[in-house]
Amino acid sequence: MRRLFFILMIIPLLFTCKSRPEIIDSIDAPLVYVVEIEPEPEEIPGIEILEPKFSIISIVILQADLVVTEFETTLRVENPNVFAVELSRIEYELFGNGSLWVEGSAKNIFVIPAESANDTKFKFEMNFINMDRRLLNDVIAMRQINYRFKGNARVQPEIPNVMAFTANYDISGLSDVNRR
């Protein structure tokens, strides 16, 4: 019985003997925050890394139905650099006359040679049920559509030891709506 009593008395002492954390009571103690930041294009002596330029070439109707219409958007990406760059991922939102048409992403897009451009096509369907009637009328009449295309792309310069970076884009303008 004494042994059990002794063990029961020691257990609380073991838990209370923990050392307490040291409290720094100084105003000069620096606060440390860890923040993950997307890397900026690196500077290499003698070489300037420029972000690609994005533009919409066309918006084409592939199949028009009363409710759902299939579109194809052609995006041109220009590489102003003296070296090739690879677009490994692109995220986008496409608006027509102020209404969100589609949002999405694509991976492993293409390599753009130095001081050159490449086009890529995005196919999507749009449901006119929740859209403004004027937008449907503009599409049916093949009038120009006021578009906005925004998002970001992951760009990998094809230079050894240079990290990929994110290029943001936000372009807008007028596009003809053509039937293929």
Image (cartoon, rainbow, N blue to C red):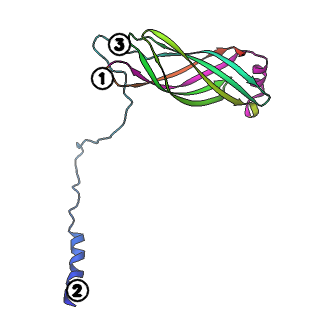
The quarter of the displayed image where residue 74 is located: top right
The local secondary structure at tag 1 comes to loop
Magenta-drawn stretch contains 154:
yes
Disc with the residue nearer the chain's start (2 vs 1): 2
Q: Which residues are magenta?
A: 130-159
- Label 3: how many Cα within 10 Å (few below 14, some 14–19, many 20+): few
Residue hosting label 1: 161
Disc with the residue nearer the chain's start (2 vs 3): 2
Q: Is residue 70 above or below residue 144?
A: below
Q: Is residue 63 above or below residue 13?
A: above
Identified at 22% across, 51% down, the residue is 25
Identified at 74% across, 23% down, the residue is 63
- Label 1: how many Cα within 10 Å (few below 14, some 14–19, many 20+): few
Task: Count the labels in the image.
Answer: 3
> What is the quadrant of the C terminus in the image?
top right
Magenta-drawn stretch contains 35:
no
The local secondary structure at tag 2 comes to helix
Q: Position of residue 102 (x, y in %)?
A: 63, 29
Mark 2–mark 1 distance (CA, rounded to whole Å): 67 Å
Question: Could you say which disc has been placed on residue 5 in the image?
Answer: 2
Left or right: where does residue 103 sit relative to residue 166? right
Identified at 63% across, 25% down, the residue is 123
Disc with the residue nearer the chain's start (1 vs 3): 3
Left or right: where does residue 154 sit relative to residue 18? right
In front here: 56 or 116? 116
Left or right: where does residue 139 sit relative to residue 41? right
Left or right: where does residue 165 sit relative to residue 103? left
The quarter of the displayed image where residue 141 is located: top right
Residue hosting label 3: 48
Q: Position of residue 145 (x, y in %)?
A: 69, 18
